[in-house]
Amino acid sequence: MALQEEFEKQGNWLFRYRGILPLIVLLAGLVLFLLTKLYPGAFFPGGFSGGTYYELACLLISLLGLFIRIYTVGHTPVNTSGRNVKKQVAGKVNTTGSYSLVRHPLYVGNFFMWLGPTLLTGQIWFVLIICLVFWLYYERIMFAEEQFLRAKFGTPYLEWASKVPAFVPRLNGFVKPDLPFSWRKVVKKEKNGFAAVFLVFFLFDMAGELILRGRDFNYVIFGGLAFSALSYVVVKILKSRTSVLNEPGR
């Protein structure tokens, strides 16, 4: 099998199971985080155990990633920028808003959402390894997605792709989104990510304090978890029992 077909096959497989790797990374990061808490500098020279403000700084990095996703999803039409896993879906090529600066803005958002908890470990070598893993992992997925879009949309896609970088956003050439921002779509599509960010930081903070038998919990994270969990439940109820979040074409 030629490399092009092999990369596309790998990318489609990773696309389908792209929710699994973050769990493995988070588990490895949590173990390393706890070891750093217990034995700062003993097994991992150069590592450090950050305090409350460092945790909040890492949280802000993850929230930056979530904001990128929210802005992107909020301006896209139906059948684009979704969380589908069974197969590639695209009703059109998005070329405005975030997509006028970078071809894969959702994966840029995902990168920052990963980076936040990874930085909690305080181990620069681990952060660099995860960045490399992220790139190799999503490189295949992006390749498969672009093969699908190229085959479906042809010249219009190629013309756009020739001007817009794949992952590192350009600093000029922004084009105003075609559609207005839709909070309804964002609430439906990004409720999982919003809750997951605070749940992950809560687990790190809680585990770190319990293993040291401390009580210096980060109540900003606790409050964020409570709010995000409540929001998640409310949105699930609204989606299942009402049509208030439905919006034609979004």
Image (cartoon, rainbow, N blue to C red):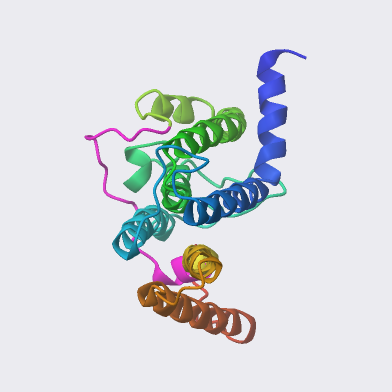
Q: Give the x, y percent position of residue 248.
A: 50, 68
Closest to the observer: 30 or 61?
30
Regarding residue 142, the answer to whether it shows in the image is yes
Q: Give the x, y percent position of residue 13.
A: 72, 37
Residue drawn at x 45%, y 72% is 184
Quadrant into which the N terminus falls = top right
Residue 174: within the magenta? yes
- Marks counted in the figure total 0
Closest to the observer: 68 or 156?
68
Q: Is residue 112 above or below residue 14?
A: below
Q: Is residue 181 left or right of residue 171?
A: right
Give the magenta-colored segment's residue range. Answer: 167-188
Closest to the observer: 151 or 138?
138
Q: Is residue 99 above or below residue 184?
A: above
Residue drawn at x 48%, y 69% is 209
Q: Give the x, y percent position of residue 14.
A: 68, 39
Q: Is residue 95 above or below residue 177?
A: above
Q: Is residue 235 left or right of residue 120?
A: right
Please tell me whether the stretch drawn in magenta is mainly helix, strand or loop: loop
Residue 126: within the magenta? no
Regarding residue 248, the answer to whether it shows in the image is no
Q: Give the x, y percent position of residue 234.
A: 53, 84
